Image (tube, coloured by chain):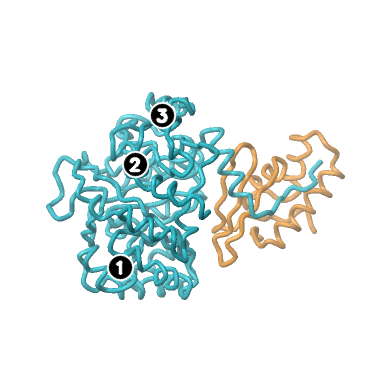
Amino acid sequence: MVRKLIKKDSSILDQTTQVAFDKCIPLFATIETTLGCNYSCVHCYNFDRSSSMPENIKGRPLKKEEFIRVIDELCDAGAFYISFTGGEALLYPHIYSLIERVIHNKSMPRVKTNGHLLTEEVCNKLYKAGCRALDISIYGADEKSYKNFTGMADGYNKVLEGVKRALSFDMEINFNIILHKDNCMDIGKLIKLAETLGVPYQFSDEVTARYDGTESSQDFGITPDQYNELLKGPHKDLFWHDNSEESFQCSCARNVVGIGLDGVVYPCIGAPIPSGDLKEHSFKDIWNDSQEFKKIRELKKEDFSDCVVCEFKHQCNRSSGSAFVNAENYTGCDPMALRVAQVRHKNKDSF
Amino acid sequence: MLLTKILSQREDIAWKEIDEQIILMDLGPKKMVHRLNSVGSFIWKELNGKNDLAAIMSAVCAEYSISKELAEKDLLEFIGNMEKLGVIVGS
């Protein structure tokens, strides 16, 4: 009767993720804690950081007590991984209390950070609060690249110091390497950096329009010519994408959810479709009853009408959030993803 | 193992019940992930630092309508496994 009470295999998390997708359990939640940032990245999706923050970009930020209630409600609904993001999440003064609350609820806190502020004191506070995992964005393989992209003169060295310090606290670190037109040809150096530090990595080559409606961020995306070169280079497999299964839907509102700093709930933090307000309703009510969420969950393959007839669909890795941000059409074509898919299609015989 | 023993989940174990199965994640240096079936999940939730093993055994008997002997045998096996994994501690 009580045999094999415990299973241990490497696919447990994959299987759990699939169960959460099928049953619409918000396993992965991202909470935006601040829009403030010590960097002024040219590609930032929040707003154009060459200007001051638009006053109307968000409503009233949640208070600490409200964030804590939201964390409790998320955990009750099944959130196991709760990521704090920004802006720069470490600039939020109550970040440690929020991490403690996630731990109190027996879930897993993660912090998405640029890594610049990982001093001994900050690492110590994170560790004491219970944080054991950081997702660190990496913007370049040298100081010049960092300066041009983030506006921070000593960013590269500061981040490396921070990474090494966090590793000494036994933190699990993942690099999210942001590829753009000025650093994509340094890919070998970026990989070597991660491997030398023993840190797992993933790439993000997607630069979207901004949530404030400006689009100049996209000027910094990898160009088609550069993509073509990357698809012929020594790391070409990293840039290939096989979508022969014709999968167009993502995890939005199924096992993923995003919470804005003003309490607005989104299908994903990368898909800014307002779907409820936690100042007015409980998370459970929004998750179960939001009309936007219901529509997304009911989407069928044929609803992605641009995609099903597209010549480049088997090489496209569109995300619905990016399609919404770039073209204001959640189920439509993302012109940025299409541009990349066309280059992949041209190179398909090499894969 | 004495049934008067009181055990509890280690403080820094993250866990969540998903579809009647508990996923455990050891946030310590091992960073291991484990999954318990529904009966293991039931026992895990009883390991709260208040119930002794005898009380948990009775709860298992009542919940799953099995004999005391079988419940004790399987409970102790489960506890042994949990101790080997280091995810429970004595209170």
Mark pair 1, 3: CA separation? 36 Å
The subunit carrying tag 3 is: A
Q: Which of these two is toward me, B39 or A51?
A: A51
Whether residue A106 is situated above or below residue A296 in the rendered picture: below
Is residue A209 toward the left or the right of residue A239 in the image?
A: left
Quarter of image, res A90: bottom left
Q: Position of residue A160 (x, y in %)?
A: 36, 73
**Which amino acid is tagged 1?**
His
Local packing at callout 3 (Cα closer than 10 Å; few below 14, some 14-19, many 20+) is many
Could you tell me which secondary element the residue under label 3 belongs to? helix
Q: Answer with mark 1 or mark 3, whichever residue precedes in sequence.
A: 1
Q: Are marks 1 and 3 on the same chain?
A: yes
Residue at the spot of label 1: A116
Pointer 1 and pointer 3: residues touching (CB < 8 Å)? Answer: no
Local packing at callout 1 (Cα closer than 10 Å; few below 14, some 14-19, many 20+) is many
The subunit carrying tag 2 is: A
Whether residue A128 is situated above or below residue A101 in the rendered picture: below
Residue at the spot of label 3: A293
Quarter of image, res A97: bottom left
Q: Chain A drawn in what color? A: cyan
Q: Answer with mark 2 or mark 1, whichever residue precedes in sequence.
A: 1
Q: Position of residue B19 (x, y in %)?
A: 61, 37
Could you tell me which secondary element the residue under label 2 belongs to? helix
Q: Are marks 3 and 2 on the same chain?
A: yes
Residue positioned 51% across, 51% down in the render: A349
Whether residue B34 is situated above or below residue A23 in the rendered picture: below
**Which amino acid is tagged 2?**
Ser
Q: Which of these two is toward me, A159 or A69?
A: A159
Residue at the spot of label 2: A322
